[in-house]
């Protein structure tokens, strides 16, 4: 597997969206009505406007990430100390996410740590074609107007992501691209060999993608295992990784 770290500027993305919207309608974005024919662009611009209120944002733990539910713990600090997450996340955004937001603690430096989980909105056919096929890994952050994401996947998935970014006109910087290695302190090092084989093969062949690209039966065959045996290894690997992140027994 390969580990890809990308970074891009919100200013560049905002300019591209505004240029695209102006080209589409012939009007500056500020003069557009809310009923324009391209609500996706307006939603993206609204998201960028929201992000510009944030001084720093970092996902501390991904607890779950699939088509049924996303759960994570994140740390956020706003430029204006009087602003909080609920001021930024509109009721509509939370409703669309069908989510739960819970404050866990406040740091002395003014940052807050939250738990969020919910069922992401089903992507439209157009968005499905643009989805990122790689799997997110930490660090995953936003700071000083720049988004930095870490992704893991095959060489083919890396090429697909970079091609998609180029086709969308997003000027991103490849911070690093290297083999995905896991140190002895990494949670994956705590798995048994069979558990590690099960979860890395499942990931690399698209079992965790949306929609899934391979079944447990096909994965089991590749490892020469019975389907039930493979599922046990996979479930135990998932539980052990989650337990490590949640500090659970």
Image (cartoon, grey):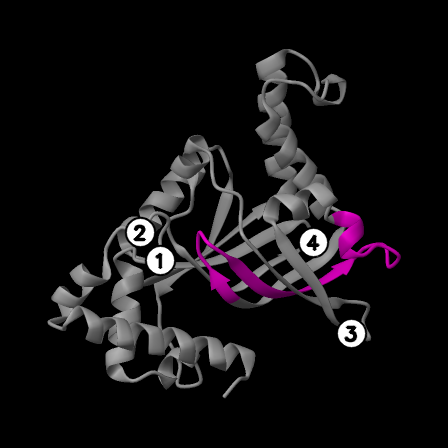
Residue at the spot 23% in from the left edge and 62% down from the top edge: 216
Residue at which label 4 appears: 144
Mark 3 lies on residue: 107
Point out the tag, 4 or 2, that comes first from the N-terminus. 4
Check if mark 2's residue and mark 1's residue have beta carbons within 8 Å: yes
Foreground: disc 4 or disc 2: 2
Vertical order, 106 against 218 (above or below) = below
Disc on res. 208: 1
Residue stretch rendered in magenta on the structure = 63-88
How many angstroms separate mark 3 from mark 1 (CA)?
Answer: 34 Å
**Closer to the camera, 69 or 82?**
69
Tell me how far mark 4 sits from mark 1, CA to CA.
32 Å
> In the picture provided, is 70 more to the left or to the right than 233?
right
Circle 2 SS class: loop
Residue farthest along the bottom direction in this orientation: 249
Q: Does the magenta stretch include residue 9?
A: no
Q: Which residue is drawn at the image coordinates 48% and 41% (left, top)?
A: 122
167 to the left or right of 78: left
- Picture quadrant where residue 164 is located: top left
Up-down: is 36 above or below 8?
A: above
Q: Give the structural element (helix, strand or loop) at label 1.
A: loop
Residue 79 located within the stretch drawn in magenta: yes
- For label 2, the residue is 212
């Amino acid at each position: 597997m390969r580990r890809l770290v990308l970074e891009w500027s919100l200013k560049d993305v905002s300019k591209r969206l505004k240029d695209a919207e102006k080209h589409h309608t012939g009007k500056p974005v500020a003069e557009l009505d809310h009923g324009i024919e391209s609500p996706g662009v307006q939603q993206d611009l609204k998201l960028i406007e929201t992000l510009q209120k944030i001084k720093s944002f970092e996902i501390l733990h991904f607890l779950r990430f699939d088509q049924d539910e996303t759960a994570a713990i994140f740390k956020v600090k706003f430029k204006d100390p009087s602003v909080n997450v609920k001021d930024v996340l509109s009721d509509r955004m939370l409703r669309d996410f069908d989510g739960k937001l819970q404050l866990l603690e406040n740091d002395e430096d003014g940052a807050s740590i939250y738990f969020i989980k919910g069922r992401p909105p089903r992507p439209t056919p157009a968005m499905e074609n643009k989805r990122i096929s790689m799997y997110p890994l930490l660090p995953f952050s936003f700071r000083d107007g720049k988004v930095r994401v870490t992704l893991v996947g095959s060489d083919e998935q890396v090429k697909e992501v970079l091609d998609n970014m180029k086709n969308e006109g997003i000027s991103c910087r490849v911070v690093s691209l290297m083999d995905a290695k896991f140190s002895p302190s990494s949670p994956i090092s705590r798995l048994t060999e069979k558990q590690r084989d099960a979860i890395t093969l499942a990931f690399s062949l698209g079992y965790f993608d949306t929609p899934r690209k391979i079944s447990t039966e096909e994965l089991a065959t590749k490892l020469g295992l019975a389907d039930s045996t493979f599922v046990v290894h996979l479930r135990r690997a998932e539980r052990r990784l989650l337990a490590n992140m949640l500090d659970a027994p």
